Amino acid sequence: DGGITQSPKYLFRKEGQNVTLSCEQNLNHDAMYWYRQDPGQGLRLIYYSQIVNDFQKGDIAEGYSVSREKKESFPLTVTSAQKNPTAFYLCASSIDPPGRVSGANVLTFGAGSRLTVL
Amino acid sequence: DQQVKQNSPSLSVQEGRISILNCDYTNSMFDYFLWYKKYPAEGPTFLISISSIKDKNEDGRFTVFLNKSAKHLSLHIVPSQPGDSAVYFCAASASGNTGKLIFGQGTTLQVKP
């Protein structure tokens, strides 16, 4: 079955530690995204990548970093500089990279990773 | 600056009745609108979309209506079923804006048996 796998599902971190969330997709999608969900705030875009070795900041990129060395993988690192890291993190991918979308840009989401900072 | 707003945090309806979820937006450059459904501890799943050149799109029990002049869209679910109980997100994108989706805050729908 094609899909997006996020790991770990739950993660606890001490303040001052960096943590990396994994996102792997086997949908052969070009574009990948990281969103963050907080209560009452919907989903906010952290980073996105249209192609391998390229990525762009979203609306709330501060304190986060990403890499896109392979088409299938888009890991997110939550650094100690992120002031409020406790949240539910969602990875997504889409078949058309932004800019070549001929219709609605339908994102497929993973199951999410819940990060709690102790 | 909240470009996509869902002003009702929650909605409760009886099984078999109509559920109407609302969404407002401010950016007139949005050309596609999407609805996603999300269960707790899971990722959102795509439900239905509509292009800005249309005013209605229907898929089974789900219909989305778009009123461009009012910058308002709504999702109708008829008839509502208990399995529809979830959080519903409205999202929008603009072709010239890399296609990234801007999401609303979400509305929690509870369908009572």
Image (cartoon, rainbow, N blue to C red):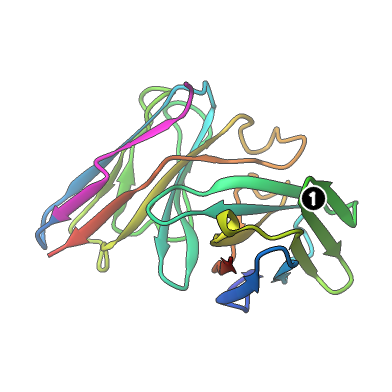
Look at label 1 and name its amino acid: Ile
- Which SS class for mark 1? strand
Q: Chain of mark 1?
A: B
> What residue would you read off at disc 1?
B50
Q: Is residue B15 left or right of residue A4?
A: right
* Residue positioned 46% across, 73% down in the render: A40
Eyeballing the image, is A87 above or below B9?
above
Compare residues B97 and B86 and report the one nearer the observer.
B86
Q: Decide which of A107, B26 is in the foreground and name it.
A: A107
Q: Is residue A20 above or below residue A71?
A: below
* B34 to the left or right of A45: right
In terms of image quadrants, where is residue B59?
top right
Which one is nearer the viewer's eye here, B34 or A53?
A: B34
Q: Residue at x 90, y 51 (%)?
A: B53
Instruction: Identify the residue shown where x is 43% and y is 32%.
Output: A4
Identify the image quadrant of the C terminus of chain A: bottom left
Magenta includes B72? Answer: no
Residue A58 lies, with reference to residue A30, above or below; the image says: below
Is A5 within the magenta? yes
Counting from the top left corner in percent of width and height, residue A66 is at 34, 41
What range is drawn magenta here? A1-12
Position above or below: B19 against A97: below
Labels in figure, total: 1
Residue A30 picture location, percent across and down: 54, 27
Q: Position of residue A26 (x, y in %)?
A: 45, 22
Q: Point out residue A32 in the picture as x, y percentages from the top left corner.
A: 48, 36
Side of A88 relative to A103 (left or right): left
Judge the density around disc 1: few (<14), some (14-19), many (≥20) Cα neighbours within 10 Å. Answer: many
